[in-house]
Amino acid sequence: MVATSSLDGATILITGGTGSFGHHVVERLLQEYSVKSIVILSRDEKKQYDMRNQYRNPQLKFCIGDTRDRQKVFEVMKGVDYVFHAAALKQVPACEFFPYEAVRTNIDGAHNVLDAAEAMGVRKVVVLSTDKAVYPINAMGMTKALMEKLMLAKAREAASATVFCGVRYGNVMYSRGSVIPLFVQQIRDGKPLTVTHPDMTRYLLPLPVAIDLVLFALEQGENGDLLVRKSPAATVRDVALAVADIFGHSTDINEIGIREGEKMHETLVTREELLKSEDYPEYYRIQNLANIDYDKFFIEGKHNDFPTEGYTSENTRRLNRSETRELILSLREIQAVLA
């Protein structure tokens, strides 16, 4: 265990902590830091039961509850030092069919978490966002974009010393509901692999790398920051072919067409955000709290050299089929399936 000045003896709350992100970040926190306790707030008692039995660690505390329940959020926030806000409705089709449910969780739930953290004197809140929040065309992305705006408003206006910041990343590989486990299941069932459009591109981010970004934000993120992890991308066709190569699968690939609410290419940083971003080798830091003279800014303007495009899955480093296969093979979930 490695103690750090910021996390040594701290209590950390993870909302939605029984999901893919929660499991991986709990592992890292228990292995690498000397935290006092980790509180898991989530709705699913079965997942909490399984997680409790998996870790059997007294540092883990479990609380059944929903971020939509304002009173519950305030109760569980007592004594918390840091918050990872991961609870969300993340599936694009589900949010398209039930947009108000996405509003209640992704916006109202986030609002409750931010208010409770400020009221209870939490040191720092890190909210988790997605490329879908950038130029959003679906309900999931729209609600996550407003979640970001709530965080930024709190960072500007909070009367407490709480720091509010966030991370934004693209598709996390092998997370629940993502395409790679779907392909694996289709192979197991002897079915054709289904792709929406072969030339559609998506960022490819292993979950441990996403956790690196979140832990970096926890220790280094400043008020109002949005930290964006740079990631390679691949076409959906190459992802499908790479999975087929790994499992020696020769069944055809069927093109089913672009579904409602999907983009051909995703964006992680807009052209407008690049104007206020610091560019580092592995990430962008979008700064949102610069002092702005709004009268002068809107009358005279500020920037002459406007970027021609944002940072997208189309213009980032493109992996070929072989590189995509090697990245997928590095996933421990794939290694477990192969074993």
Image: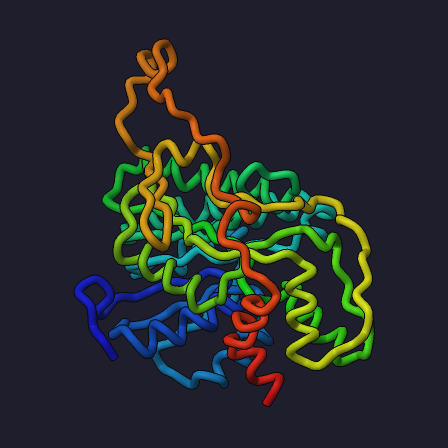
Q: Residue furthest left?
A: 5
Asked if residue 111 is positioned above or below residue 44 in the image, the reply reads above
Asked if residue 250 is positioned above or below residue 203 in the image, the reply reads below
Query: Residue visible at 54% across and 51% down?
Result: 68
For this view, does 61 lie left or right of residue 278?
Answer: right
Q: Residue furthest top?
A: 299
Q: Position of residue 84 (x, y in %)?
A: 40, 58
Query: Residue visible at 82% across and 69% down?
Result: 252
Is the N terminus in the top left, top right, bottom left or bottom right quadrant? bottom left
Is the C terminus in the top left, top right, bottom left or bottom right quadrant? bottom right
Q: Residue furthest bottom?
A: 339
Q: Position of residue 61 (x, y in %)?
A: 40, 73
Asked if residue 174 can be seen in this view, the reply is no
Q: Quadrant of residue 6?
A: bottom left
Query: Residue visible at 36% across and 81% down?
Result: 58
For this view, does 166 lie left or right of residue 133?
Answer: left
